[in-house]
Image (spheres, helix red, strand yellow):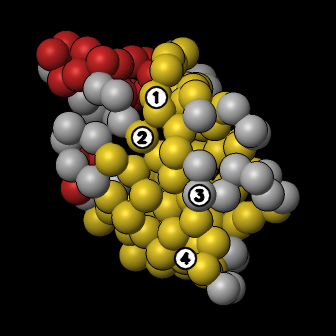
Amino acid sequence: MAFLGKVYTFDRQENFDEYLKHMGVTDEKVIQQYAQMKATAQLKKEGDKYRYITYSVNGNNEVVFESGVEVNDVGMNGIPIKSTYTVDGNTVTQVVNSSMGSGTVIREFSDDLLKMSVTTLGWDGVAVRYYKA
């Protein structure tokens, strides 16, 4: 698990604008901000728990979780959500439940890339964000 502790920086995205619009974000300036911010992500392991940390100009977020156990989390724009993170090798699958609906985020880690695929109920697309180590 060489990716643990490594910092990944946002590089590019596919179909994320459409995902944001589906989630009710209609302001084009806000959508462009998501595309331009150089967020970073990092996954650390601490005993039986994991710590997933994101840093961006819009604020930082940190969630501590055990694989397969639901936790209180924070979604876009600070909306409270419930998440269950499941770690399987180099893949972390996050199942999200919130007042805005349910969805899944699959994070695939490699030595030099973090690929984050986002889906949500009621939307047929898949948004993908790429981060480079």
The residue that mark 1 highlights is 10
Label 3 close to label 1 by CB (< 8 Å) = no
Decide which of tag 3 and tag 4 comes sooner along the chain. Answer: 3
**Pair 3/1: label in front:** 3
**How far apart are labels 3 and 1 at the CA level?**
16 Å
Res 120 visible: no
Crowding around mark 1 (Cα neighbors within 10 Å: few <14, some 14 to 19, many 20+) is: many
The residue that mark 3 highlights is 5
Decide which of tag 3 and tag 2 comes sooner along the chain. Answer: 3
Q: Residue at x 52, y 45 (%)?
A: 7
Q: Residue at x 27, y 54 (%)?
A: 60
**Pair 3/2: label in front:** 3
Quadrant assignment, res 46: bottom right
Q: Residue at x 55, y 76 (%)?
A: 65
Which amino acid type is marked by label 4? Phe
The residue that mark 4 highlights is 65
Tally of numbered discs: 4
Decide which of tag 1 and tag 2 comes sooner along the chain. Answer: 1
Decide which of tag 3 and tag 1 comes sooner along the chain. Answer: 3
The residue that mark 2 highlights is 40
Which amino acid type is marked by label 2? Thr
Decide which of tag 4 and tag 2 comes sooner along the chain. Answer: 2
Question: Would residue 108 be found to the left or right of residue 103 on screen?
Answer: right
Picture coordinates of residue 27 (x, y %)? 16, 20
Q: Nearer the viewer, residue 81 or 48?
A: 48
> Residue 37, labelled with which disc?
none
Q: Nearer the viewer, residue 53 or 71?
A: 53
Picture coordinates of residue 82 (x, y %)? 44, 69
Picture coordinates of residue 36 (x, y %)? 30, 18
**Pair 4/2: label in front:** 2
